[in-house]
Amino acid sequence: MSSHQANHISFGTDGFRGIIARDFTYDVVRKTAQGMADYIAYKYMRTEKPTVAVGYDRRFMSDRFARTLAEVLAANGLNVTLSSTPLPTPAVSLLTAKGYGLGVVITASHNRHYYNGIKVKQNGRSAPPAVTAEIENYVAKAVPMKPSGAPLQVKDFRQAYVDYLNSKVPSAKVLNKLPGKVVVDFMHGVGAETAGEVFNSKNVVKLRDRHDPLFGGMAPEPVEKNLQELVEAVKKNKAMFGVALDGDADRFALVSDKGQYMTPCQTGPLLLSYLLSKGAYKGKIAQAVSMGFLTKRIARAAGLPFEETPVGFKYLAEKMLHEDVTFAVEESGGYAWKGNLPERDGALTALFVMEMAVKTGKPVSALYAEIEKKYGKSCFVRRDFTLEKAIPNKHSFAVKIKKKLPKILLGRKITETNTIDGLKIVLDNDWWVLMRPSGTEPLLRTYAETDSQENTKKFLDLAFKLVEQK
């Protein structure tokens, strides 16, 4: 997220974001573009400079901000191509795996309509923290060049993305074999731009695919409270399942045939279990520290290595690029697996679930019941607390609480305390709670998972008490 100082741009878990006309203005976009150009000029002083692809989502003024950014980059002598249409973020990531050295997307992802932002892509995924930190330093000192007025290169990139999706899960084959209806909720986001071709079938019911820069008055974030329309449509159409994509179409959410919202701690195991049934995988299962124990239990049963990373898909992407990773998952609805880009992709995940329905012939609720029977129940809840003031140092906060922990919580032994991103406490039966201060806002994010709503609530209450005693 952005900080509120006009001149300071900071790339958070995935990109810089700010409120339009306050933190996110034409001046900020020009300054950021110049910072990127200066970074490229320095980094590629002796080698050929990378070509840049610029995309944007369906938000208010995203197309104009994208053009402004592209004009500044072009004024610096860079070879820039601007997308002629709104484009899903994973499509821009794809371009950076197919010839473009750098991708930039104007998007504020799942945030409310009055936000906009910038994401930087490289090698098929979000630019790593080392790159965005360097760009931040150049942006702080940047003096934007005036655009030359020369016409920009503009291209329609949608077909390249559709071709990529079809090369991974042939949609025409899968969609026509679906044994029932499926509802796809685009939440008025950019996923609908390529949907006509990808989800073109009488078996697919499309929801909220109209371009609405206000996103129907809610944040285009595929979490339970925003998906009532999808739940109703699944029940009404007696669908096999429903899926939702966020504003820039990289996140994914699932609703079962019973109209039940599946948490990422339930969806992740479902996808992983199906993936492992398709072949012999030896690679690591990697997940964000805010993810659950079912994926861990599946990895254990399959004899696969397992590792947790800080929150933010860029950390998982790095692992996928440099190590043998079979499956990567984060709690905010990001899923990726071997054989694809090291990037979360809502449309690809939706097609994968459709393939799963065709191949198994079973509805989502039945498939999940099998997982529950084998690996246990998962009741995951995330709760955000407002604090009196922001906690600036996440690590020292975690260490302070860790020192005061008793040996037993909820009548179980503590077997692990993880401080890579806040403090995660794991009990001897795999139940866990994570306390993660925002760092920029007076907010504490708490996440917990046990075998029942009652126990999860107890664990979250306990976590808040531990923070109050700090």
Image (cartoon, helix red, strand yellow):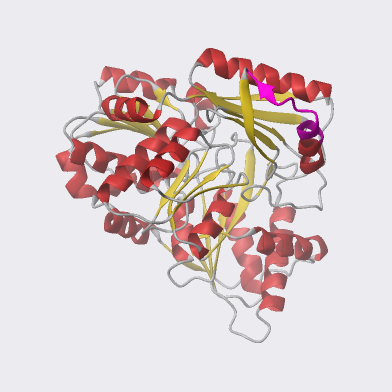
Quadrant including the N terminus? top right
Reply above or below: 384 against 87: above
Q: How many marks?
A: 0
The residue that appears at 64% across and 20% down in the rendered structure is: 460
Horizontally, residue 357 falls left or right of residue 11, namely left
Magenta-drawn stretch contains 402: yes
Quadrant including the C terminus? top right
Magenta-drawn stretch contains 280: no
The residue that appears at 24% across and 48% down in the rendered structure is: 171
Quick one: 416 or 460, which is closer to the camera?
416
Quick one: 151 or 440, which is closer to the camera?
440
The residue that appears at 36% across and 40% down in the rendered structure is: 271
| Bounds of the magenta segment | 400-410
| Residue 391 point in image, percent of width and height | 81, 35
Residue 245 seen by the camera: no
Q: Residue 398's image quarter?
A: top right
| Residue 410 point in image, percent of width and height | 63, 18
Quick one: 254 or 220, which is closer to the camera?
254
Residue 3 seen by the camera: yes
Horizontally, residue 247 falls left or right of residue 73, namely left
Horizontally, residue 269 falls left or right of residue 469, namely left
Reply above or below: 404 against 165: above
| Residue 276 point in image, percent of width and height | 32, 47
Reply above or below: 247 against 321: above
Reply above or below: 147 against 267: below
In the orientation shown, which residue stands out farthest toward the bottom?
46
Quick one: 209 or 245, which is closer to the camera?
245
| Residue 17 point in image, percent of width and height | 67, 45
